Image (cartoon, helix red, strand yellow):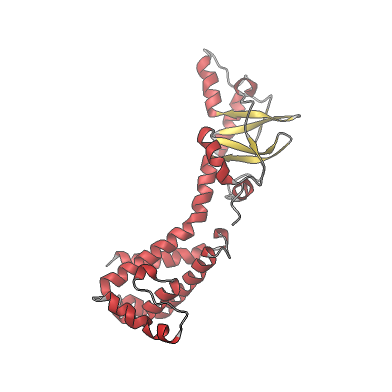
Amino acid sequence: MEFFTAADVLSHRTAATPDEPVTVDLDDSIQNALTLMLEHDFDQLPVVSDDGVEGTVTYKSVAKYVKSMDDPRVEETSVKIALNTNPKFVERDHDIFELFDTLAEDDYVLIGDQDDLDGILTRYDILYFLEHQVEPFLQIGEIEESLRHLFRTFFDDLDQAIDETFADRAEHDESYEAPDRPEDFSFDDYRMFMMRNLDHLPPRLSQERDMVESLLEDIRETRNALLHFRAEADEVDRDQLDMAHGYFTGIASTV
């Protein structure tokens, strides 16, 4: 499996994210740096000159300077006075999981090198990216739990219903091993069990039979693609998954 890289996180942008790194010039004032940080909701900025990246300026470094001065005059004072001169650089192909130890000590890392800055990554950037990647798995897991809740609620003898549902397939397909309990279901098993037992489940499911079967099939394909790494989370139809998640968890929450 190819792990996520710094470049993957950089490419995971929102509409509000600048395409190029936001920087401040070495001769700019602290006031200007603070204005840029407030404008973009950043806690730090790379500081550049004609020679490349000189370091970074952060809210923390500015606060230390202001605290040490009786009259700091941030509108006149250059960022040089609040410069962190040893920021950590990593390459674009750097594995983000190897950054955890670094980001446990530092709030950010710079991507690229002193002469060619690609961007800056913070703890928040990586956590936000990982949340985006993991969300489809969490939603599918919650859908499965909702279906199991429905089965336990509406079947007096769930074990018998499972045996009766899968007995025929197990008899005619030697490669198929029938599940003993809902926790062992594949998503194809969920679909088969539900469609063969809709009369035992909430009436809404029977009334919307075609949509239910379509949603279950879509989830099955998405789940299998993700688990077998045939698709990445960015390729998932999230609107479709959101709809299925809201539909099944919503029904389960009312019983």
Furthest toward the right, the residue is: 50
Quarter of the figure with residue 198: bottom left
Q: Is residue 22 visible?
A: no
- Residue 58: x percent and y percent? 56, 29
Query: Percent from the top left, x then y, of residue 15?
Result: 58, 50
* Of 29 and 239, the residue lying toward us: 239
From this view, report whether residue 3 is shown above or below residue 70.
below
Q: In this image, 170 relative to 56: left or right? A: left
Q: State whether residue 243 is above or below residue 91.
A: below
Q: Where the C terminus falls, by quadrant?
A: bottom left
Q: Which residue: 58% across, 45% down?
A: 96
Query: Front-most of 248 and 114?
Result: 114
Task: Return the residue found at the far top.
Answer: 70
Residue 19 appears at what percent x and percent y?
65, 46
Question: Residue reaching furthest left?
Answer: 156
In this picture, residue 254 sits left or right of residue 48: left
- The part of the image, by quadrant, that contains residue 51 is top right
Residue 212: percent from left, percent from top: 41, 75
- Left or right of residue 205: residue 16: right
| Residue at x 43% of width, y 80% of height | 210
Q: At x 55% / y 24%, what residue is drawn?
A: 62
Q: Residue at x 35, y 81 (%)?
A: 165
Is residue 157 in view from this perspective? yes
Q: Quadrant of the N terminus?
A: bottom right
Front residue (pair 196, 10): 196
